[in-house]
Amino acid sequence: MKKKSIFHKMSDTGLLLTITIVIFFLMYIGAIIFQGGGFTKPQMFFNILNLNAALIITACGMSVVMITGGIDISVGGVVALVSMCCAVYLDYHDGSILGSILIALGIGLAYGLIQGFLVAYLDIQPFIVSLAGMFFARGMTTIVNTAPFNVADEEFTALKLTRIYVPGMGSVNKKGIYVPAYVEIGVIVALIIVVLLFLVLRYTKLGRSFYAVGGNKQSALMLGLNVKKTKFISHLICSELAGIAGYVYFLHAGSGSASHAMGMEMNAIASSIIGGTMLTGGVGNIIGTLFGVLSLSTIQNIVSSAGLDQAWWTGITIAAMLCIFLLIQSVVMAQKKRALKN
Amino acid sequence: MSKNIKNKESLLKRLTGNQLFIPIIAIILLAVINLINDPGFFKITPVINNAGNTVLSGYLITILDYGSELGILAIGMTLVTAASGGQDISVGATIAIAGSAMLRVLCGGQARPTELQAPIIVAFLVACVVGMLCGAFNGMLVSVFKIQPMIATLILFTAGRSIAAWINNNELPIVPDPKFAYFGGFIPGCPIPTTVFIVIACIIVIALVLKFTNLGLYTQAVGINESSSRLNGINPTFIKFLAFVILGLCVAVAALIKVSRLSTINYSVIAKDIEMDAILAVALGGNALSGGKFNMWASILGAYVIQFLTTTLYKFNVQSDALAAYKAVVVILLVVFSAPTVREKMNQLTKKVKPAKKEVA
């Protein structure tokens, strides 16, 4: 009985966040025990970050939209479009780094303004708007350039290869040489965004109004919040972050291709859900999302290092995880509702 | 100009209020564009195909032929949209699963069998069961666990093509029997594509179902107001579940056509982006994407409008990869003009124009 009372005392956000963090650590410890070797090295963990910096950023944006009660599935397309545009700009038009960053931000801004306007002020379902946005971005990417290619720009390559060494972390390799652990620039950007968004969601009026609008639109309106503006801003943030993520992805991949970031929107949604963001809105946490991304990529790593590296296993495991977490959410919420009634 | 006329003549207003109005106008528009671009667009000529049969050929036949999967999917998607107020985005992936299961039965797990391992009808029934199971999975998540339809179907959308590859061990079996190709091609001696007959059969079945059962009424009731329909003795959980299972059946039929066209399967490409087209077909048919009332015939017509659009875009030398961008623009324009807020604004505008016009008169 005592356990039940704790269960009831926790807020929705706290409860789902706890589940996620516990599962992540269980999974990582499980990986260390059963597969050993690689997972004990700090670099393994940092590689997960390096690989998924763009996903962390998109997932954060996705969480903001989902907390406000919407959804945005155009992010993967935007990431591909940004990386292709930047690649073409750098290579064919001899552009500068600053210019390419501005392009990335500009595409994100344009997407945010249009989608936000359609969703917030014209009351069109966010799923339909962003579905169209996704197809538009994918189509535009092939119109900009059909063939995938690597960027040869020197300044850019230098930026791409920049490694930031993590002090105090590292491992001794087989030859007995100490190799310090490193992260790429994208990871720093991603972590800054996570911290910023965490603070905004927690301590600012804007952040709290996201929760209010997502929780109950009607009461938010009664409280005098500008519901439309809040929705608009949430979509703006999401698309802008997708633009930034596109640049981070580009920085990691160093190439433009129409098949970049395929299915990234699904991974972002899955990470948000695993991280305890409710689809119905009003519940969620950026830290949870971060752990969601980490759980997702740890599972992928486990799957591939368990020798099941046929491509289909990744898809199936992610979907299975998504399914389990959706069911947990559904059951937990149904129970809480029943408990509240009694 | 047209707005003024619309207000004056009630007949025209009634016409524009009809759900079939948008798809028919779209068809006429596309037809005119094509006629201007190429006067020979509507010519249908008999040609002799690879198998040595005399068959009809022409852009119109292409549209009727290749629009059939979409037409069949539109039937199920309309029901799902009306009942649950959301859309199923896993249809493309489910087509891959059902098609893969069909091939597995037909070829018995061999990559290059010399003869069929099972009758075609058995393979088709297996595909139907698999499609309905996928539908039941989605339906269960939506109706019992109350997960938003698009998110619930996201699971199969992510995993579907992987599951399809897994069913056949990632091999691409080729069906040896030429009879299997009849379903997506031509039956010897018949100049009309077989797919047209399949669509007609599906339409007759759904017409009979809507005519003689309460499915249509109940679906609309659940879509309009779930709790009040429950108070009236309808089981909303079951109706939603049923809609997804019916969509699963439609998917299996579409998978038969898709697989039959090639006699083999490509897991990552088969029925790619078809979910977008199916949703677009429902929207073009003037059905509210938030559920409620529906018009099945408008949806099916909408599916052919989309195929018409696709064919037209191909004719203008648009790359197949870039097609999505153009279609996306059409979707956005469509949803913007059908958005309640925009309609209200337009009505206000016409009202403002109307009195001004009277004063002048």
Image (cartoon, coloured by chain):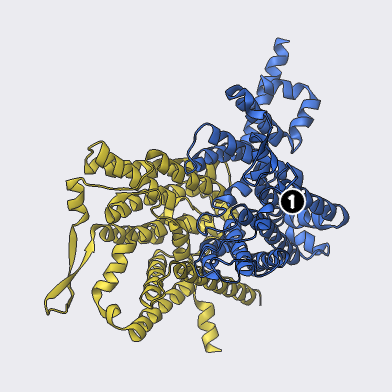
Chain colours: A yellow, B blue
Q: Residues within 10 Å of mark 1 (few under 14, many from 20)?
A: some
Q: Secondary structure at mark 1?
A: helix
Q: Residue at x 44, y 74 (%)?
A: A20
Task: Give coordinates of residue A296: x percent, y percent.
Answer: 41, 69
Q: Is residue A164 above or below residue B32?
A: below
Q: Chain of mark 1?
A: B
Instruction: Name which quarter of the figure residue A35 lies in.
Output: bottom left
Mark 1 sits on what residue? B198
In the image, what residue occupies the spot 52% across and 45% down? A132
Is residue B227 rendered to the left or right of residue B63? right
Q: Is residue A119 left or right of residue A191?
A: right
In the image, farthest residue toward the bottom? A1
Residue A108: x, y in percent?
A: 38, 45
- Residue extending furthest right? B212
Comparing A193 with B218, the one in front is B218
Residue A270, relative to residue B284: is it above or below? below
Number of numbered discs on residues: 1
Report the quarter where the N terminus of chain A lies. Answer: bottom right
Q: Is residue A211 left or right of residue A197?
A: right
User: Where's residue A216, x and y in %?
Assistant: 57, 58
Quadrant in which the C terminus of chain A appears: bottom right
Whether residue B289 is visible, yes or no, is no
Of B84 and A208, the residue lying toward us = B84
- Residue A5 visible to the viewer: yes
Above or below for B301 versus B123: above
Give amino acid for label 1: Ile
Q: Position of residue A31 (x, y in %)?
A: 36, 81
- Residue situated in front as seen by the camera: B168 or A45: B168
Up the image or down, B44 lies above or below B220; here it is above
